[in-house]
Protein backbone atom coordinates (compact mmCIF):
# COMPACT_ATOMS: atom_id res chain seq x y z
CA UNK A 1 0.00 0.00 0.00
CA UNK A 2 1.64 3.25 -1.05
CA UNK A 3 1.44 6.57 0.77
CA UNK A 4 -1.42 8.18 -1.15
CA UNK A 5 -3.75 5.20 -0.91
CA UNK A 6 -3.13 4.97 2.79
CA UNK A 7 -3.78 8.71 3.20
CA UNK A 8 -7.05 8.45 1.28
CA UNK A 9 -8.17 5.44 3.27
CA UNK A 10 -7.39 7.16 6.57
CA UNK A 11 -9.19 10.29 5.44
CA UNK A 12 -12.26 8.26 4.46
CA UNK A 13 -12.36 6.51 7.84
CA UNK A 14 -11.87 9.85 9.60
CA UNK A 15 -14.76 11.39 7.70
CA UNK A 16 -17.02 8.47 8.57
CA UNK A 17 -16.12 8.77 12.25
CA UNK A 18 -16.70 12.51 12.22
CA UNK A 19 -20.07 11.94 10.53
CA UNK A 20 -21.10 9.48 13.24
CA UNK A 21 -19.91 11.80 15.96
CA UNK A 22 -21.66 14.82 14.50
CA UNK A 23 -24.89 12.94 13.77
CA UNK A 24 -26.73 14.54 16.75
CA UNK A 25 -26.09 17.95 15.18
CA UNK A 26 -27.38 16.75 11.82
CA UNK A 27 -30.44 15.34 13.55
CA UNK A 28 -31.12 18.73 15.16
CA UNK A 29 -31.00 20.52 11.82
CA UNK A 30 -33.06 17.90 9.97
CA UNK A 31 -35.76 17.83 12.64
CA UNK A 32 -36.31 21.58 12.35
CA UNK A 33 -37.33 21.16 8.71
CA UNK A 34 -39.89 18.42 9.35
CA UNK A 35 -43.58 19.06 9.67
CA UNK A 36 -45.38 18.30 12.93
CA UNK A 37 -46.53 14.89 11.73
CA UNK A 38 -43.30 13.94 9.96
CA UNK A 39 -41.44 14.33 13.25
CA UNK A 40 -43.33 11.31 14.61
CA UNK A 41 -43.13 9.15 11.50
CA UNK A 42 -41.96 5.54 11.90
CA UNK A 43 -39.49 4.80 10.43
CA UNK A 44 -38.09 8.32 10.90
CA UNK A 45 -37.16 10.10 7.71
CA UNK A 46 -33.50 11.06 7.46
CA UNK A 47 -34.26 13.73 4.90
CA UNK A 48 -37.25 16.09 5.18
CA UNK A 49 -39.97 15.40 2.59
CA UNK A 50 -40.96 19.03 2.22
CA UNK A 51 -38.74 21.42 4.23
CA UNK A 52 -40.78 23.61 6.57
CA UNK A 53 -38.76 26.81 6.73
CA UNK A 54 -41.60 28.67 8.39
CA UNK A 55 -40.90 26.84 11.67
CA UNK A 56 -38.04 29.25 12.36
CA UNK A 57 -40.14 32.39 12.02
CA UNK A 58 -42.90 30.80 14.07
CA UNK A 59 -40.60 29.84 16.94
CA UNK A 60 -38.72 33.15 16.81
CA UNK A 61 -41.99 35.03 17.21
CA UNK A 62 -43.87 32.78 19.61
CA UNK A 63 -40.96 32.15 21.98
CA UNK A 64 -39.73 35.73 21.96
CA UNK A 65 -36.28 34.63 20.94
CA UNK A 66 -34.97 38.07 20.12
CA UNK A 67 -35.31 39.04 23.74
CA UNK A 68 -33.74 35.83 25.06
CA UNK A 69 -30.76 36.04 22.71
CA UNK A 70 -30.27 39.71 23.57
CA UNK A 71 -30.12 38.82 27.27
CA UNK A 72 -27.62 36.04 26.55
CA UNK A 73 -25.54 38.54 24.60
CA UNK A 74 -25.64 41.12 27.39
CA UNK A 75 -24.58 38.54 29.96
CA UNK A 76 -21.83 37.09 27.74
CA UNK A 77 -20.39 40.47 26.71
CA UNK A 78 -20.54 41.75 30.27
CA UNK A 79 -18.75 38.67 31.60
CA UNK A 80 -16.05 38.83 28.93
CA UNK A 81 -15.47 42.53 29.59
CA UNK A 82 -15.18 42.09 33.35
CA UNK A 83 -12.98 39.01 33.04
CA UNK A 84 -10.67 40.64 30.48
CA UNK A 85 -10.20 43.83 32.49
CA UNK A 86 -9.35 41.89 35.64
CA UNK A 87 -7.69 38.83 34.16
CA UNK A 88 -5.18 40.15 31.63
CA UNK A 89 -3.03 42.03 34.13
CA UNK A 90 -3.19 39.17 36.59
CA UNK A 91 -2.05 36.68 33.93
CA UNK A 92 0.77 39.01 32.90
CA UNK A 93 2.19 39.30 36.39
CA UNK A 94 1.88 35.56 37.01
CA UNK A 95 3.76 34.92 33.77
CA UNK A 96 6.52 37.45 34.42
CA UNK A 97 7.79 36.30 37.78
CA UNK A 98 8.78 32.97 39.15
CA UNK A 99 8.77 32.83 42.92
CA UNK A 100 6.89 31.38 45.85
CA UNK A 101 4.22 34.10 45.76
CA UNK A 102 3.42 33.38 42.15
CA UNK A 103 3.13 29.69 42.98
CA UNK A 104 0.69 30.48 45.78
CA UNK A 105 -1.36 32.70 43.45
CA UNK A 106 -1.45 30.05 40.74
CA UNK A 107 -2.43 27.36 43.19
CA UNK A 108 -5.25 29.53 44.49
CA UNK A 109 -6.47 30.20 40.96
CA UNK A 110 -6.37 26.56 39.96
CA UNK A 111 -8.27 25.53 43.07
CA UNK A 112 -10.98 28.15 42.55
CA UNK A 113 -11.33 27.07 38.92
CA UNK A 114 -12.77 23.68 39.82
CA UNK A 115 -15.68 24.65 42.05
CA UNK A 116 -18.90 23.41 40.40
CA UNK A 117 -21.35 26.21 39.70
CA UNK A 118 -24.34 24.20 40.89
CA UNK A 119 -22.70 23.79 44.29
CA UNK A 120 -21.54 27.41 44.58
CA UNK A 121 -24.89 28.88 43.63
CA UNK A 122 -26.40 28.28 47.08
CA UNK A 123 -24.04 30.55 49.02
CA UNK A 124 -23.81 33.04 46.15
CA UNK A 125 -27.58 33.32 45.91
CA UNK A 126 -28.06 33.76 49.66
CA UNK A 127 -25.21 36.27 49.84
CA UNK A 128 -26.49 38.25 46.88
CA UNK A 129 -30.00 38.32 48.27
CA UNK A 130 -28.69 39.71 51.57
CA UNK A 131 -26.72 42.38 49.75
CA UNK A 132 -29.73 43.32 47.64
CA UNK A 133 -27.92 42.28 44.46
CA UNK A 134 -30.95 40.36 43.20
CA UNK A 135 -32.45 43.71 42.25
CA UNK A 136 -29.95 43.70 39.37
CA UNK A 137 -30.18 40.07 38.33
CA UNK A 138 -28.22 40.25 35.09
CA UNK A 139 -25.36 42.10 36.77
CA UNK A 140 -25.40 39.53 39.56
CA UNK A 141 -25.13 36.72 37.00
CA UNK A 142 -22.27 38.53 35.21
CA UNK A 143 -20.34 38.83 38.47
CA UNK A 144 -20.98 35.18 39.34
CA UNK A 145 -19.85 34.02 35.89
CA UNK A 146 -16.76 36.23 36.10
CA UNK A 147 -15.77 34.68 39.40
CA UNK A 148 -16.30 31.21 37.96
CA UNK A 149 -14.55 31.64 34.60
CA UNK A 150 -11.74 34.08 35.34
CA UNK A 151 -9.31 31.41 36.59
CA UNK A 152 -9.61 29.53 33.28
CA UNK A 153 -9.00 32.78 31.37
CA UNK A 154 -5.97 33.63 33.50
CA UNK A 155 -4.44 30.18 32.93
CA UNK A 156 -4.88 30.47 29.15
CA UNK A 157 -3.67 34.07 28.85
CA UNK A 158 -0.73 33.38 31.12
CA UNK A 159 0.46 30.74 28.67
CA UNK A 160 0.28 33.38 25.92
CA UNK A 161 2.35 35.87 27.94
CA UNK A 162 4.93 33.16 28.60
CA UNK A 163 5.45 33.07 24.84
CA UNK A 164 6.30 36.78 24.66
CA UNK A 165 10.10 37.14 24.95
CA UNK A 166 10.95 39.16 28.03
CA UNK A 167 13.97 40.70 26.21
CA UNK A 168 11.59 42.81 24.11
CA UNK A 169 10.02 44.32 27.19
CA UNK A 170 13.42 44.93 28.76
CA UNK A 171 14.61 46.66 25.60
CA UNK A 172 11.58 48.94 25.73
CA UNK A 173 12.37 49.80 29.36
CA UNK A 174 15.98 50.62 28.44
CA UNK A 175 14.65 52.90 25.72
CA UNK A 176 12.93 54.95 28.38
CA UNK A 177 9.45 53.48 28.50
CA UNK A 178 7.70 53.21 31.83
CA UNK A 179 6.37 49.81 32.91
CA UNK A 180 2.88 50.87 31.93
CA UNK A 181 4.12 52.13 28.57
CA UNK A 182 6.03 48.92 27.85
CA UNK A 183 3.04 46.83 28.88
CA UNK A 184 0.61 48.61 26.59
CA UNK A 185 2.86 49.24 23.60
CA UNK A 186 4.98 46.06 23.51
CA UNK A 187 3.64 43.17 25.59
CA UNK A 188 -0.08 43.56 25.02
CA UNK A 189 0.06 43.82 21.20
CA UNK A 190 2.28 40.74 21.03
CA UNK A 191 -0.13 38.72 23.14
CA UNK A 192 -3.22 40.05 21.38
CA UNK A 193 -4.18 36.90 19.48
CA UNK A 194 -3.96 34.64 22.50
CA UNK A 195 -6.03 37.05 24.56
CA UNK A 196 -8.69 37.29 21.85
CA UNK A 197 -9.00 33.51 21.53
CA UNK A 198 -9.28 33.10 25.30
CA UNK A 199 -11.90 35.85 25.44
CA UNK A 200 -13.80 34.08 22.69
CA UNK A 201 -13.80 30.83 24.65
CA UNK A 202 -15.12 32.67 27.71
CA UNK A 203 -17.75 34.31 25.52
CA UNK A 204 -18.99 30.95 24.24
CA UNK A 205 -19.17 29.55 27.75
CA UNK A 206 -21.02 32.57 29.10
CA UNK A 207 -23.40 32.61 26.13
CA UNK A 208 -24.59 29.12 27.10
CA UNK A 209 -24.46 29.57 30.87
CA UNK A 210 -27.45 28.09 32.69
CA UNK A 211 -27.19 27.40 36.45
CA UNK A 212 -26.59 30.95 37.66
CA UNK A 213 -29.11 32.50 35.27
CA UNK A 214 -31.78 29.93 36.13
CA UNK A 215 -31.37 30.47 39.86
CA UNK A 216 -30.82 34.23 40.02
CA UNK A 217 -32.99 35.69 37.25
CA UNK A 218 -36.68 35.31 38.05
CA UNK A 219 -38.16 37.81 35.57
CA UNK A 220 -38.74 36.22 32.17
CA UNK A 221 -37.85 39.49 30.37
CA UNK A 222 -34.30 39.28 31.70
CA UNK A 223 -33.63 35.57 31.23
CA UNK A 224 -31.06 34.33 28.68
CA UNK A 225 -31.75 31.82 25.91
CA UNK A 226 -30.56 28.81 27.94
CA UNK A 227 -33.27 29.39 30.55
CA UNK A 228 -35.79 30.02 27.77
CA UNK A 229 -34.91 26.69 26.18
CA UNK A 230 -35.30 24.96 29.54
CA UNK A 231 -38.78 26.35 30.08
CA UNK A 232 -39.71 25.39 26.51
CA UNK A 233 -38.90 21.74 27.22
CA UNK A 234 -41.63 20.57 29.54
CA UNK A 235 -41.62 16.97 30.79
CA UNK A 236 -44.23 15.78 28.28
CA UNK A 237 -43.31 17.89 25.32
CA UNK A 238 -44.02 16.78 21.77
CA UNK A 239 -43.05 19.91 19.84
CA UNK A 240 -39.65 18.52 18.98
CA UNK A 241 -39.39 20.31 15.65
CA UNK A 242 -40.02 23.65 17.39
CA UNK A 243 -37.59 22.90 20.20
CA UNK A 244 -34.92 21.91 17.68
CA UNK A 245 -35.58 25.14 15.77
CA UNK A 246 -35.04 27.07 18.99
CA UNK A 247 -31.82 25.14 19.64
CA UNK A 248 -30.69 25.75 16.06
CA UNK A 249 -31.14 29.50 16.23
CA UNK A 250 -29.38 29.55 19.59
CA UNK A 251 -26.38 27.42 18.68
CA UNK A 252 -25.71 28.18 15.00
CA UNK A 253 -23.89 31.50 15.60
CA UNK A 254 -21.58 29.76 18.08
CA UNK A 255 -20.95 26.89 15.67
CA UNK A 256 -20.22 29.33 12.84
CA UNK A 257 -17.64 31.21 14.92
CA UNK A 258 -16.10 27.94 15.98
CA UNK A 259 -15.77 26.47 12.49
CA UNK A 260 -14.31 29.72 11.13
CA UNK A 261 -11.72 30.12 13.88
CA UNK A 262 -11.28 26.45 14.68
CA UNK A 263 -7.50 26.25 14.26
CA UNK A 264 -6.84 29.17 16.59
CA UNK A 265 -9.37 28.10 19.18
CA UNK A 266 -7.96 24.59 19.39
CA UNK A 267 -4.37 25.73 19.62
CA UNK A 268 -5.24 28.42 22.17
CA UNK A 269 -7.10 25.89 24.26
CA UNK A 270 -4.34 23.32 24.24
CA UNK A 271 -1.51 25.75 24.95
CA UNK A 272 -2.87 26.70 28.34
CA UNK A 273 -5.09 23.92 29.59
CA UNK A 274 -2.45 21.25 29.54
CA UNK A 275 0.93 20.86 27.97
CA UNK B 1 2.64 59.65 47.92
CA UNK B 2 4.82 60.55 44.98
CA UNK B 3 6.94 57.48 45.54
CA UNK B 4 3.81 55.37 45.60
CA UNK B 5 2.73 56.74 42.24
CA UNK B 6 6.08 56.24 40.58
CA UNK B 7 6.16 52.72 41.94
CA UNK B 8 2.75 52.17 40.43
CA UNK B 9 4.04 53.39 37.11
CA UNK B 10 7.45 51.89 37.07
CA UNK B 11 8.14 49.42 39.79
CA UNK B 12 6.82 46.52 41.75
CA UNK B 13 3.71 48.51 42.66
CA UNK B 14 2.52 48.10 39.07
CA UNK B 15 2.65 44.33 39.34
CA UNK B 16 1.09 44.23 42.77
CA UNK B 17 -1.78 46.45 41.65
CA UNK B 18 -2.37 44.30 38.58
CA UNK B 19 -2.57 41.12 40.60
CA UNK B 20 -4.25 42.43 43.75
CA UNK B 21 -7.56 43.47 42.18
CA UNK B 22 -8.31 40.20 40.39
CA UNK B 23 -7.23 38.07 43.31
CA UNK B 24 -9.25 40.25 45.66
CA UNK B 25 -12.26 39.86 43.39
CA UNK B 26 -11.81 36.10 43.27
CA UNK B 27 -11.44 35.81 47.02
CA UNK B 28 -14.51 37.96 47.54
CA UNK B 29 -16.76 36.23 44.99
CA UNK B 30 -15.41 32.68 45.15
CA UNK B 31 -13.46 32.26 48.38
CA UNK B 32 -15.97 34.00 50.62
CA UNK B 33 -18.97 31.99 49.30
CA UNK B 34 -16.92 28.87 49.97
CA UNK B 35 -16.62 29.86 53.65
CA UNK B 36 -20.21 31.07 53.78
CA UNK B 37 -21.29 27.69 52.43
CA UNK B 38 -19.66 25.93 55.37
CA UNK B 39 -21.27 28.38 57.81
CA UNK B 40 -24.72 27.83 56.27
CA UNK B 41 -24.33 24.08 56.50
CA UNK B 42 -24.46 24.52 60.29
CA UNK B 43 -27.50 26.77 60.15
CA UNK B 44 -31.15 26.47 59.40
CA UNK B 45 -31.71 28.57 56.29
CA UNK B 46 -35.07 28.74 54.57
CA UNK B 47 -37.14 31.28 52.65
CA UNK B 48 -37.91 33.27 55.82
CA UNK B 49 -34.47 33.52 57.33
CA UNK B 50 -32.88 34.19 53.95
CA UNK B 51 -32.55 37.94 54.42
CA UNK B 52 -31.13 38.04 57.93
CA UNK B 53 -27.75 37.12 59.31
CA UNK B 54 -29.09 35.97 62.68
CA UNK B 55 -30.11 32.46 61.83
CA UNK B 56 -30.36 29.64 64.29
CA UNK B 57 -27.27 27.46 64.48
CA UNK B 58 -28.20 23.82 64.52
CA UNK B 59 -24.77 22.25 64.91
CA UNK B 60 -24.36 19.09 62.92
CA UNK B 61 -28.08 18.49 62.49
CA UNK B 62 -28.03 19.18 58.76
CA UNK B 63 -25.35 16.55 58.35
CA UNK B 64 -27.01 13.91 60.51
CA UNK B 65 -30.37 14.60 58.82
CA UNK B 66 -28.75 14.32 55.44
CA UNK B 67 -27.25 10.92 56.03
CA UNK B 68 -30.46 9.68 57.65
CA UNK B 69 -32.48 10.47 54.54
CA UNK B 70 -33.40 7.40 52.48
CA UNK B 71 -32.49 8.99 49.14
CA UNK B 72 -28.96 10.04 50.15
CA UNK B 73 -27.14 6.77 49.50
CA UNK B 74 -28.85 6.01 46.16
CA UNK B 75 -27.94 9.52 44.98
CA UNK B 76 -24.34 9.11 46.11
CA UNK B 77 -24.21 5.78 44.28
CA UNK B 78 -25.69 7.44 41.17
CA UNK B 79 -22.99 10.09 41.34
CA UNK B 80 -20.33 7.39 41.50
CA UNK B 81 -21.83 5.54 38.51
CA UNK B 82 -22.16 8.78 36.59
CA UNK B 83 -18.57 9.81 37.28
CA UNK B 84 -17.01 6.42 36.55
CA UNK B 85 -19.17 5.73 33.48
CA UNK B 86 -18.65 9.18 31.99
CA UNK B 87 -14.91 9.27 32.54
CA UNK B 88 -14.39 5.73 31.28
CA UNK B 89 -16.41 6.39 28.13
CA UNK B 90 -14.91 9.81 27.41
CA UNK B 91 -11.39 8.66 28.06
CA UNK B 92 -11.44 5.38 26.13
CA UNK B 93 -13.20 6.76 23.05
CA UNK B 94 -11.12 9.93 23.25
CA UNK B 95 -7.89 7.96 23.48
CA UNK B 96 -8.88 5.76 20.54
CA UNK B 97 -9.66 8.80 18.41
CA UNK B 98 -6.47 10.57 19.48
CA UNK B 99 -4.39 7.51 18.50
CA UNK B 100 -6.17 7.33 15.15
CA UNK B 101 -5.63 11.00 14.32
CA UNK B 102 -2.03 10.76 15.50
CA UNK B 103 -1.27 8.96 12.23
CA UNK B 104 -0.62 11.96 10.08
CA UNK B 105 -2.72 12.24 6.96
CA UNK B 106 -3.91 15.32 5.06
CA UNK B 107 -6.87 16.93 6.81
CA UNK B 108 -6.25 15.09 10.09
CA UNK B 109 -5.83 18.13 12.32
CA UNK B 110 -8.79 19.96 10.79
CA UNK B 111 -11.15 17.01 11.18
CA UNK B 112 -9.90 16.39 14.69
CA UNK B 113 -10.63 19.99 15.61
CA UNK B 114 -14.15 19.66 14.22
CA UNK B 115 -14.98 17.15 16.96
CA UNK B 116 -14.66 19.95 19.48
CA UNK B 117 -18.04 21.42 18.46
CA UNK B 118 -19.64 19.18 21.09
CA UNK B 119 -17.58 20.98 23.69
CA UNK B 120 -18.36 24.58 22.69
CA UNK B 121 -22.12 24.05 22.48
CA UNK B 122 -24.30 25.25 25.38
CA UNK B 123 -25.04 22.32 27.68
CA UNK B 124 -28.76 22.98 27.47
CA UNK B 125 -28.69 22.60 23.68
CA UNK B 126 -26.75 19.34 23.92
CA UNK B 127 -29.33 18.19 26.45
CA UNK B 128 -32.22 19.16 24.19
CA UNK B 129 -30.77 17.30 21.21
CA UNK B 130 -30.08 14.16 23.23
CA UNK B 131 -33.47 14.40 24.87
CA UNK B 132 -34.99 14.14 21.42
CA UNK B 133 -32.64 11.40 20.20
CA UNK B 134 -33.35 9.36 23.35
CA UNK B 135 -37.09 9.95 23.31
CA UNK B 136 -39.00 6.72 23.91
CA UNK B 137 -41.57 6.34 21.15
CA UNK B 138 -40.08 8.35 18.32
CA UNK B 139 -36.41 8.69 19.26
CA UNK B 140 -33.94 7.89 16.52
CA UNK B 141 -31.67 5.89 18.84
CA UNK B 142 -34.43 3.40 19.58
CA UNK B 143 -35.08 3.15 15.84
CA UNK B 144 -31.43 2.39 15.10
CA UNK B 145 -31.20 -0.15 17.93
CA UNK B 146 -34.39 -1.87 16.72
CA UNK B 147 -33.25 -2.00 13.12
CA UNK B 148 -29.90 -3.51 14.07
CA UNK B 149 -31.72 -6.06 16.22
CA UNK B 150 -30.11 -5.02 19.49
CA UNK B 151 -33.45 -4.47 21.20
CA UNK B 152 -36.95 -5.81 20.60
CA UNK B 153 -39.02 -3.13 22.32
CA UNK B 154 -38.44 0.59 22.72
CA UNK B 155 -36.42 1.67 25.72
CA UNK B 156 -37.88 4.67 27.51
CA UNK B 157 -34.50 6.18 28.19
CA UNK B 158 -35.71 9.28 29.97
CA UNK B 159 -38.57 7.89 32.06
CA UNK B 160 -37.49 4.33 32.84
CA UNK B 161 -35.71 4.34 36.22
CA UNK B 162 -33.39 1.58 35.02
CA UNK B 163 -32.11 3.63 32.11
CA UNK B 164 -32.49 7.34 32.92
CA UNK B 165 -29.07 7.70 34.54
CA UNK B 166 -27.46 6.00 31.54
CA UNK B 167 -29.26 8.37 29.19
CA UNK B 168 -27.46 11.28 30.85
CA UNK B 169 -24.17 9.37 30.90
CA UNK B 170 -24.49 8.75 27.16
CA UNK B 171 -25.02 12.45 26.45
CA UNK B 172 -22.17 13.37 28.78
CA UNK B 173 -19.79 10.96 27.05
CA UNK B 174 -20.65 12.58 23.72
CA UNK B 175 -20.09 16.02 25.22
CA UNK B 176 -16.71 15.31 26.80
CA UNK B 177 -15.06 12.85 24.42
CA UNK B 178 -13.71 15.53 22.10
CA UNK B 179 -12.05 17.48 24.90
CA UNK B 180 -10.34 14.32 26.14
CA UNK B 181 -9.22 13.56 22.61
CA UNK B 182 -7.69 17.01 22.03
CA UNK B 183 -5.76 16.94 25.30
CA UNK B 184 -4.56 13.39 24.68
CA UNK B 185 -3.46 14.40 21.18
CA UNK B 186 -1.32 17.13 22.70
CA UNK B 187 0.23 14.58 25.01
CA UNK B 188 0.88 12.14 22.16
CA UNK B 189 2.57 14.76 20.01
CA UNK B 190 5.02 15.39 22.84
CA UNK B 191 6.49 11.88 22.69
CA UNK B 192 9.84 11.93 20.85
CA UNK B 193 9.59 10.03 17.56
CA UNK B 194 13.04 8.41 17.77
CA UNK B 195 11.83 6.27 20.67
CA UNK B 196 9.53 4.50 18.24
CA UNK B 197 12.16 4.22 15.54
CA UNK B 198 14.54 2.56 17.99
CA UNK B 199 11.81 0.17 19.17
CA UNK B 200 10.91 -0.69 15.61
CA UNK B 201 14.54 -1.52 14.83
CA UNK B 202 14.54 -3.80 17.85
CA UNK B 203 11.56 -5.61 16.35
CA UNK B 204 8.76 -4.40 18.65
CA UNK B 205 5.32 -4.57 17.05
CA UNK B 206 2.68 -1.85 17.28
CA UNK B 207 1.00 -3.44 20.30
CA UNK B 208 4.28 -3.73 22.22
CA UNK B 209 5.25 -0.18 21.29
CA UNK B 210 1.93 1.07 22.68
CA UNK B 211 2.38 -0.72 26.01
CA UNK B 212 6.08 -0.01 26.50
CA UNK B 213 6.42 3.51 25.09
CA UNK B 214 3.10 5.30 24.59
CA UNK B 215 1.40 4.45 27.89
CA UNK B 216 4.42 4.95 30.20
CA UNK B 217 5.39 8.30 28.67
CA UNK B 218 1.79 9.49 28.79
CA UNK B 219 1.36 8.59 32.44
CA UNK B 220 1.33 12.11 33.89
CA UNK B 221 -0.85 13.40 31.04
CA UNK B 222 -3.35 10.61 31.64
CA UNK B 223 -3.40 11.37 35.35
CA UNK B 224 -4.11 15.03 34.66
CA UNK B 225 -6.84 14.24 32.15
CA UNK B 226 -8.63 11.78 34.42
CA UNK B 227 -8.51 14.31 37.26
CA UNK B 228 -9.79 17.01 34.92
CA UNK B 229 -12.51 14.62 33.74
CA UNK B 230 -13.57 14.08 37.35
CA UNK B 231 -13.74 17.85 37.87
CA UNK B 232 -15.78 18.42 34.71
CA UNK B 233 -18.09 15.48 35.41
CA UNK B 234 -18.89 16.78 38.87
CA UNK B 235 -19.68 20.15 37.29
CA UNK B 236 -22.20 18.66 34.88
CA UNK B 237 -25.59 20.13 35.64
CA UNK B 238 -27.17 21.27 32.39
CA UNK B 239 -27.65 17.77 30.98
CA UNK B 240 -29.61 16.68 34.06
CA UNK B 241 -31.77 19.78 33.86
CA UNK B 242 -32.45 19.20 30.18
CA UNK B 243 -32.83 15.42 29.93
CA UNK B 244 -34.27 13.92 33.12
CA UNK B 245 -34.45 16.62 35.84
CA UNK B 246 -33.00 13.96 38.12
CA UNK B 247 -36.11 11.82 37.74
CA UNK B 248 -38.01 9.62 37.71
CA UNK B 249 -38.12 9.56 41.50
CA UNK B 250 -34.40 10.47 41.84
CA UNK B 251 -33.37 7.49 39.69
CA UNK B 252 -31.01 9.72 37.73
CA UNK B 253 -30.29 12.27 40.43
CA UNK B 254 -26.70 13.09 41.33
CA UNK B 255 -25.35 15.19 44.18
CA UNK B 256 -24.57 18.32 42.18
CA UNK B 257 -28.13 18.43 40.86
CA UNK B 258 -29.63 17.43 44.17
CA UNK B 259 -27.83 20.24 46.01
CA UNK B 260 -29.43 22.72 43.64
CA UNK B 261 -32.85 21.07 43.98
CA UNK B 262 -32.72 21.23 47.77
CA UNK B 263 -31.92 24.93 47.65
CA UNK B 264 -34.02 26.14 44.76
CA UNK B 265 -36.90 23.66 44.58
CA UNK B 266 -37.44 22.87 48.25
CA UNK B 267 -35.96 26.19 49.51
CA UNK B 268 -33.94 24.35 52.15
CA UNK B 269 -30.76 26.33 51.64
CA UNK B 270 -29.08 24.88 54.71
CA UNK B 271 -29.46 21.36 53.35
CA UNK B 272 -28.31 22.47 49.91
CA UNK B 273 -25.22 24.02 51.44
CA UNK B 274 -24.56 20.82 53.37
CA UNK B 275 -24.58 18.67 50.23
CA UNK B 276 -22.38 21.28 48.52
CA UNK B 277 -19.80 21.18 51.31
CA UNK B 278 -19.58 17.39 51.12
CA UNK B 279 -19.13 17.46 47.35
CA UNK B 280 -16.67 20.35 47.28
CA UNK B 281 -14.36 18.28 49.47
CA UNK B 282 -14.31 15.62 46.74
CA UNK B 283 -13.74 18.18 43.99
CA UNK B 284 -10.88 19.71 45.96
CA UNK B 285 -9.19 16.32 46.24
CA UNK B 286 -9.47 15.86 42.46
CA UNK B 287 -8.10 19.36 41.96
CA UNK B 288 -5.10 18.56 44.12
CA UNK B 289 -4.35 15.50 41.97
CA UNK B 290 -4.70 17.65 38.85
CA UNK B 291 -2.47 20.43 40.14
CA UNK B 292 0.15 17.92 41.25
CA UNK B 293 0.28 16.20 37.88
CA UNK B 294 0.57 19.47 35.95
CA UNK B 295 2.85 21.20 38.43
CA UNK B 296 5.94 21.19 36.26
CA UNK B 297 4.14 22.75 33.33
CA UNK B 298 2.38 25.34 35.43
CA UNK B 299 5.67 26.56 36.84
CA UNK B 300 6.97 26.90 33.30
Image (spheres, rainbow, N blue to C red):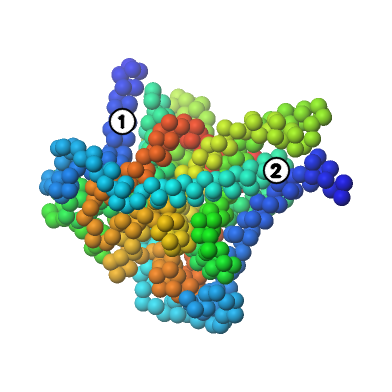
Q: Quadrant of the N terminus of chain A?
A: top left
Which mark is in front, 1 or 2?
2
In the picture, residue B104 is in which quadrant? top left
Q: Choose between A45 and B84: the one closer to the eye.
A: A45
Q: Earlier in the sequence, mark 1 or mark 2?
A: 1
Mark 1 residue crowding within 10 angstroms, few (<14) / some (14–19) / many (20+): some
Along the horizontal axis of the image, is A218 left or right of B290? left
Which residue is painted at 32% across and 27% down in the image? Answer: A10
* Residue B165 pos. (x, y %): 31, 60
Q: Choose between B199 and B158: the one closer to the eye.
A: B158
Kindly report the distance in space between the C-alpha atoms of the residues bearing marks 1 and 2: 43 Å
Q: Which residue is mark 2?
A: A93
**Chain assignment, label 2:** A
Q: How many marks?
A: 2
Q: Which residue is mark 1?
A: A15
Tell me the element at label 2: helix
* Residue A50 pos. (x, y %): 16, 37
* Above or below, A75 relative to A156: below
Along the horizontal axis of the image, is A96 left or right of B182? right
Which residue is painted at 23% across and 61% down in the image? Answer: A236
Amino acid sequence: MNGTTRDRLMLAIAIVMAAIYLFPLYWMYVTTLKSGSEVFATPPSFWPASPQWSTYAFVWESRNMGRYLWNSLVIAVGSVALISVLGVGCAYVLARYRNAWVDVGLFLILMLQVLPASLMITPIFVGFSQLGMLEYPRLAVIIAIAAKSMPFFVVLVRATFMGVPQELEEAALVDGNSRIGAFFSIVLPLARNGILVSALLIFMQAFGEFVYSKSIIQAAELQPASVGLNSFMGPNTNEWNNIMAYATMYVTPILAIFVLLQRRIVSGLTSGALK
Amino acid sequence: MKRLFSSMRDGLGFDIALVAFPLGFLLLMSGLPLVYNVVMSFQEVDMFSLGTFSRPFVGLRNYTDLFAQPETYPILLNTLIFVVGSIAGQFLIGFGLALFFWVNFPGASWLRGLFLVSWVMPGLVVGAIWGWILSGDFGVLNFILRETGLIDANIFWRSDPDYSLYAVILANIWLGTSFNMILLSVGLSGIPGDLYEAAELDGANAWQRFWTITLPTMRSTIGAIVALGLIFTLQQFDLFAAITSGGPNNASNVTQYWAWELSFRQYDFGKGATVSVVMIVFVMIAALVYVRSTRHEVRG
